[in-house]
Amino acid sequence: MRKTLIVWGIASFVLCGTANAQSLSTSSGAKSSTQAKTMKASIHQFQVESINGGTFDFRELAGKKVMIVNTASECGFTPQYKELQALYEKYQGRLVIIGFPTNDFGGQEPGSNREIANFCEVNYGVSFPMMAKITVKGEQMHPVYQFLTQRAKNGLKNSKVEWNFQKYLLNPKGELVEVLASDVKPNDPQIISWIESK
């Protein structure tokens, strides 16, 4: 009888321990799942090639608002470079503008990275960070633009890059907050308001 009680006690202990372990595992899993759902994706996860061949780490942008623009040298919107540079100079320290040259629309950016960099400097005095030429649509879309255009990756919305000089606005945490069309000028009141807001 005593032996039976001991065996029963051991079995009960093992079962309780297993149940508690399962409970803790389930609780931990639920917590992790909740955290995953509430955690927003950030642009800060990326490292990309700069127009001069170096590596640009988006983690360096932490704490600053960011505007990402796909650019081209032979587009009707190319003069926006001047306004982008003026905006960058005025709000330097609070805003970083990142240019991504692309030849995806009308073949309006045919030059090499060196030619593009020279064009931007000579004609518009561009000093904000310019990245190496990329693709912003289709199967060869760059990972940064996959993030910017896909809700599953950015946590906000799906979008499509319609033309050169489309603008993506990101908060100091690197989270996407807005997408603006090419014809929205860099000095548009809504952009200024966004930059100056807390």
Image (cartoon, grey):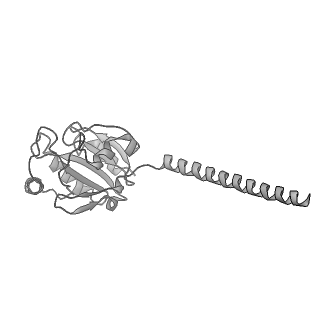
Q: Residue at x 57, y 50 (%)?
A: 29
- Placement of the N terminus among the 4 image quadrants: bottom right
Q: Is residue 49 above or below residue 190?
A: below
Q: Nearer the viewer, residue 28 or 123?
A: 28
Query: In x, y percent, where is residue 185?
Result: 21, 42
Q: Nearer the viewer, residue 119 or 150?
A: 150
Query: In x, y percent, where is residue 171?
Result: 37, 51
**Left or right of 26 on screen, residue 54:** left
Across the whole image, how many numbered discs are drawn on residues?
0
Query: In x, y percent, where is residue 112?
Result: 10, 53
Quick check: can you spot residue 106? yes
Q: Nearer the viewer, residue 44 or 98?
A: 44
Judged from this view, the residue extending furthest toward the right is 1
Q: Nearer the viewer, residue 26 or 36?
A: 26
Quick check: can you spot residue 193? no
Query: In x, y percent, where is residue 125?
Result: 12, 57
